[in-house]
Image (cartoon, grey):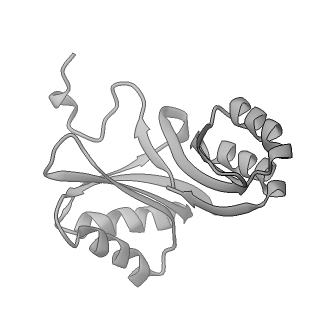
C-alpha cells in the first residue's frame, strides 16, 4: 500500500548537498513528491524536508541510502499526529471588479492575504496544510488561475521532540 512519508533531514550546509540528495532518489527510481530546503539555527546545517510515497520497505531503503551520504547528519520520519506540516501558496487569479467581494470573502474565510491587486488580477498568499490549500484552489479555479507557486511541505515535530540531540535543549 502506498503511503505518504515526510522525512526531515539535517545536512551539512555547503554547495552540492541538495544535488547529491536528489540524485540519490533518481538513481534508485524513487519519486520525490515535495522537497523544501531551509537554513537552521546552526549556519553549518540545512534542513531538507522530503515527501515521498511508498511502503515501509521503500521508506527503510530511502533512510538507509540517505544515511550513507557523508553530508547527512540525521534523518527522521515525521508523523502527522505529533508534527506540524505546512505549505505556502502564492496564487495569481483573474479578479474582475464584479468578483472581488466574493474573492475577498473566500480570502478571509481561509485566512489568506491579498498581497497585490491590479485592475484585473489579484495575488493571494495562503499558508496551511496541503488539504486547506487544495480546497482553496478549488474555490479559486472558476476565476481563472493565471499562475501559482507552491512551496511543498515543510514540517517540524511538536513539543520537546527535536531532530537534534535532546540534551542540547534548554528551558
Task: Pinpoint residue 159: horizontal percent, then vertical percent.
Answer: 39, 25
> Residue at position x 78%, y 41% from top?
100
In depth, the one of 102 and 58 nearer the eye is: 102
Is residue 128 visible to the viewer in this orientation of the structure?
A: no
Question: Which residue of the protein is positioned furthest toward the top in this rendering?
Answer: 171
Give the image quarter of residue 126.
top right
Task: Pinpoint residue 69: horizontal percent, then vertical percent.
Answer: 22, 69
Looking at the rendered image, the quarter that the N terminus falls into is: bottom right
Is residue 10 visible to the viewer in this orientation of the structure?
A: yes
Looking at the rendered image, the quarter that the C terminus falls into is: top left
Say above or below: 65 vs 48. below
Relative to 164, is 97 on the left or the right? right
> Residue at position x 25%, y 53% from top?
46
Relative to 38, is 123 on the left or the right? right
Task: Pinpoint residue 120: horizontal percent, then vertical percent.
Answer: 73, 55
Task: Pinpoint residue 82: horizontal percent, then vertical percent.
Answer: 49, 33
In depth, the one of 102 and 36 nearer the eye is: 102
Question: Which residue of the protein is positioned furthest toward the front in this rendering?
Answer: 119
Say above or below: 72 vs 40. below
Say above or below: 81 vs 138. above
In depth, the one of 34 and 7 nearer the eye is: 34
Relative to 148, is 82 on the left or the right? left
In depth, the one of 88 and 142 nearer the eye is: 142
> Residue at position x 40%, y 67% from top?
62
Question: Which residue of the protein is positioned furthest toward the bottom in this rendering?
Answer: 27
Relative to 119, is 76 on the left or the right? left
Total marks in image: 0
> Residue at position x 21%, y 40% from top?
41
Amino acid at each position: 500500500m502506498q503511503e505518504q512519508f515526510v522525512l526531515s533531514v539535517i545536512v551539512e550546509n555547503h554547495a552540492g548537498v541538495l544535488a547529491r540528495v536528489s540524485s540519490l532518489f533518481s538513481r534508485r527510481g524513487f519519486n520525490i513528491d515535495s522537497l523544501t530546503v531551509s537554513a537552521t539555527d546552526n549556519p553549518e546545517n540545512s534542513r531538507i524536508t522530503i515527501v515521498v510515497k511508498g511502503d515501509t520497505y521503500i521508506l527503510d531503503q530511502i533512510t538507509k541510502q540517505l544515511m550513507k551520504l557523508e553530508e547527512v547528519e540525521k534523518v527522521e520520519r515525521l508523523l502527522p499526529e505529533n508534527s506540524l506540516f505546512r505549505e505556502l501558496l502564492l496564487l495569481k487569479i483573474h479578479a474582475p471588479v464584479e468578483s472581488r467581494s466574493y474573492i475577498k470573502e473566500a480570502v478571509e474565510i481561509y485566512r489568506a492575504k491579498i498581497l497585490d491587486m491590479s485592475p484585473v488580477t489579484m495575488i493571494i498568499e495562503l499558508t496551511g496544510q496541503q488539504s486547506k490549500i487544495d480546497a482553496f484552489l478549488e474555490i479559486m479555479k472558476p476565476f481563472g488561475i493565471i499562475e501559482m507557486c507552491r512551496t511543498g511541505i515543510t514540517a517540524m515535530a511538536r513539543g520537546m521532540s527535536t531532530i537534534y540531540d535532546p540534551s542540547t535543549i534548554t528551558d
